[in-house]
Amino acid sequence: MDQKGKALALIIATIITISSVGILFAAGYLNNNSPIEIVDMAGRTVKVNATVSRVVILESYWTEIACVLGAQDNIVGIGSYVTSSVFIPDSVKNKTVVGNVFSGVNIETVLSLQPDLVIMDYGYGKASDIVASLESAGIPVVTLFAKNFGDITNATAIIGKVFGKTERAQALVNYMNALHTQLLSNASKIPVSERPRVLICNLDVWKDGLIYTYSNTSWGNVVVDVGGINVAHEGFGDKSWVKVNMEQVLLWNPDIIVVVGRTQSVLESQISSMNDSTWLSLNAVRGGRVYPVLTGSYDLNSYLDWTPRMVVGELELAGYIQPAHFASLNWTATKEQLLTNYYGYLKG
């Protein structure tokens, strides 16, 4: 083939290539809606559009993370518990409510919102049935859950990838990990002999003669991370939430009791119930080391939750459990830094 022939062939090949690319774009294979794969926290591989613009989120904590990452405008539907969170803007809380994992989800309502994706918990309630119904209707579902600090940062990264906010998510994860690493470093230097025995519990079921304890959960594991011994790990280490009677608490006889609740009134009620002779016989009560701690998202002073606020909650517990070893880590300063840098939407 002479030079003219080669040139002509090159031109034709170029035209074909350009045309093929155009066809691929038209078909949606090379544009921003090309599918990407997300490996969720149940180990499921989920295909979603590279750019999602309409998402339904069932839980308040995952919704909060999406808002922190700047994706609130992409949320078109929410779970019923999202509306009670003080960390979520009204513009999101006013979105269509579709149900929740416990009572179920109205699939027709979800379909009417034409979502690209649903984000939700798994492993309890009606979660498995909801996932099956949504996927059979052609809606991808990403499932998340947290038993420790690493799960929360993993969930943050996944949510960032879903919404195309990878850089901001990574910056937030790096910030959280830096604080968590410092906390673990401090705790690693604490001798075993200086590690108090800690019961972290909820007394909401006390009327039934039972106490709700946290063992292999995100909050229960914080106790260990900050240099304490979680007494619920003795015999219940593989379980998440355990109901025990007072006889078991007496056997544990913890040095510290952390009572958790979602509102100040709930905490006050729980603490006031600990005034009988049985409670007063415990080392923690006699030593004045019973600490009420807000959890969840009902109060702006709550930090123990499956959100970036967890780094503040860890430091708060560290101050109660190991005050001498965490005096240099100011949890109130960390709170202000976190809220200023990532929760600015609450002020507007």
Image (tube, helix red, strand yellow):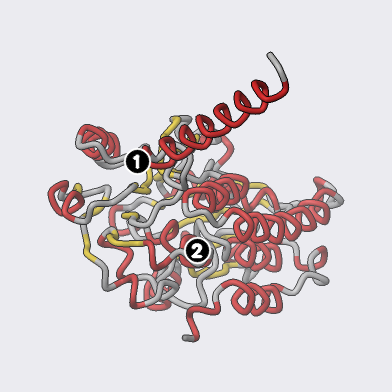
Q: Is residue 224 above or below residue 10?
A: below
Q: Which residue is mark 1?
A: 141
Q: Position of residue 239 (x, y in %)?
A: 48, 36
Q: Residue at x 82, y 63 (%)?
A: 325
Residue type of the residue flagged with mark 2: Val
Can you name the residue that lies furthest to the top here? 1
Quarter of the N terminus within the rendering: top right
Name the one closer to the observer, 292 or 95. Answer: 95
Name the one closer to the observer, 19 or 315. Answer: 19
Q: Is residue 340 above or below residue 201?
A: below
150 with respect to 245 (left or right): right
Q: Which mark is residue 241?
A: none
Q: Position of residue 232 (x, y in %)?
A: 54, 43
For the residues bearing labels 2 and 1, Cβ distance under 8 angstroms = no
321 with respect to 68 (left or right): right
Name the one closer to the observer, 213 or 75. Answer: 75
Give the SS element for disc 1. strand
Name the one closer to the observer, 30 or 6. Answer: 6
Q: Residue at x 31, y 55 (%)?
A: 56
Q: Position of residue 320 (x, y in %)?
A: 67, 67
- For label 2, the crowd category at 10 Å Cα-Cα, with few meaning under 14, some 14 to 19 and many 20 or more, is many
- For label 1, the crowd category at 10 Å Cα-Cα, with few meaning under 14, some 14 to 19 and many 20 or more, is many
Can you name the residue that lies furthest to the left here? 108
Q: Position of residue 288 (x, y in %)?
A: 62, 71
Residue type of the residue flagged with mark 1: Val
**Which sits earlier in the primary sequence, circle 2 or circle 1?**
1
329 with respect to 69 (left or right): right
The answer to whether residue 212 shows anywhere in this view is: yes
Give the SS element for disc 2. strand
Q: Residue at x 28, y 37 (%)?
A: 131
Q: Which residue is mark 2?
A: 259
Front of the two marks 2 and 1 = 1
